[in-house]
Image (spheres, rainbow, N blue to C red):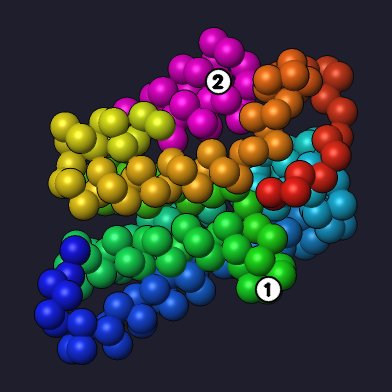
Amino acid sequence: MIDPISWGYSWPYILTAFIGGYSIGSVPFGLLFTKMSGLGDIREIGSGNIGATNVLRTGKKGIAAATLSADIIKGVFAALIGTQFGPDIAVIAALGAFLGHLFPVWLKFQGGKGVATAIGIILTLSWQTGLIAISVWLLAAVLLRYSSLAALLGAIAAPIAAWWMATPQLVEFFAVIAILIWIRHFANIKRLLKGDETKIGSTSDKPHTKDNTP
């Protein structure tokens, strides 16, 4: 990370990178797309989450795919801009985008769970690590058929893969992302432990009670 001795010089750039990343990440595409499509407020549907998984509960696969793509692009865009100013600024901008998605000021800090935005960030900062995390996510989704469990396993895979494929700085950063994703999936983890979590493609997909950690 940035040498502490240079904080007095660097803090305006650090703050700018973080705020810029946060502004990008805080755009609630799931909410915007569902409202523009006449589907109402996605926060009143299913789990109340603004991410692609909950958007899919509207039955509109195209809108869910658009939400997933846009949330990934948020992470890519923030990290990509940051890399133009060095690895430290890239991490700070990416962290801002990730926290912006989780805690958007426009929605009273009640945002998504961060999986799609994390994918964009990890792919941009270490594409090899990103491909491994995505592979774990997809394999778990196909075999276990739990979207939340697949996301949790993919999140764990990122810092582990980065240990061999990226810098120590990115190992730490991806570990922070993984921890936050697990925290945001707390309600899902409880349902998984109880056996109440809905499987992917289940015909009995009933709306969940709104998560306390959306």
Q: Which residue is drawn at 56% across and 59% down?
A: 101
On screen, 30 above or below 3? above
Q: In this view, does 193 lie to the left or right of 122?
A: right
Please provide percent x and percent y for residue 73.
46, 55
Q: Is residue 89 left or right of residue 115?
A: left
**Amino acid found under the numbered disc labelled 1:** Trp
User: Which residue corresponds to mark 2?
Assistant: 141
From this viewpoint, is residue 97 visible? Answer: yes
What amino acid does circle 2 point to?
A: Ala
Give the residues drawn in magenta, as a range. Answer: 132-155
Quarter of the rendering occupied by the N terminus? bottom left
Which residue appears at 68% of the width and 32% of the height?
Answer: 188
Q: Tags 2 and 1 in contact by the CB under 8 Å rule?
A: no
| Any part of residue 62 in sight | no
Residue 126 x, y percent position in the rendering:
24, 44
Quarter of the image for residue 183 reads top right
Instruction: Say which element carries label 1.
Output: helix
Q: Mark 1 points at which residue?
A: 106
